[in-house]
Amino acid sequence: IKELTEGAEDKAALRGKLHQAALALAAEAEFGSQHGAVPVAAGEIEAGRKLIAGELGCTDCHRFHDAGELGNAPDLTGYGSRAWLAKMIANPQGERFYAGDRNDRMPAFAADPQQPKHNLLGPQELDLVVAWLRGEWHEPERLAADDSAKATAEAARK
């Protein structure tokens, strides 16, 4: 990115490319729904994926699908998804994240799935942490609004 910010490319164009890359990373998270979010065209996401794997140089350090190598920085494939977060929290020293001595701070909270009693978090606790990080917690107001909208739609169909 440093080379891109120092080049002749104007800042508006760079911001646009970074926005597309952010959309691609958001798509990796596989959110079931993003309340209040503006729908994103598949072309924007694909353009962002190409930028991550190419021009922006993200894969110089990160792996992203088939581009880049594991080991320098966390794999961005599936970034922010339930599976990605669960594996990262369970064992940040895993091959996809900070393998070897690259992790100097975060403990492994559930590195041994075969022996849950040896872990800091059990499967249910790990799932709760992942849900919280993804914003997937119980929201009574939103659920009531969703139920009301469903009832209105059903009534309109009758």
Image (cartoon, rainbow, N blue to C red):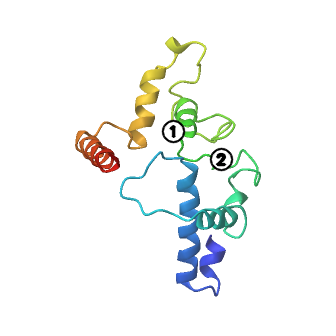
Q: Secondary structure at mark 2?
A: loop
Q: Position of residue 142 (x, y in %)?
A: 27, 45
Q: Residue at x 54, y 43 (%)?
A: 81
Q: Amino acid at mark 2?
A: Asp
The residue type indicated by label 1 comes to Arg
The picture quadrant where one finds residue 49 is bottom right
**Looking at the image, residue 66 lies above or below residue 41:** above
Quarter residue 71 falls in: top right
Tag in front: 2 or 1 = 2
Towards the viewer: 27 or 141: 141
Mark 2 vs 1, N-terminal side: 2
Rendering coords of residue 61 (x, y %):
69, 55
In which quadrant of the rendered view does residue 22 lie? bottom right
Q: Position of residue 38 (x, y in %)?
A: 43, 63
Q: CA distance from mark 2 to mark 1?
A: 18 Å
Split into 4 quadrants, where in the image is the C terminus?
Answer: top left
Placement of 9 over or under 87, stated as above or below? below
- Residue 124 location, x and y as percent? 44, 22
Residue pointed to by mark 2: 75
Between 116 and 142, the one lying in front of the other is: 142
What residue is shown at x 71% (from left), y 58% (from top)? 59
Residue beneath disc 1: 105
Q: Residue furthest front?
A: 158
Does residue 104 appear in this view? Answer: no
Q: Residue at x 43, y 43 (%)?
A: 134
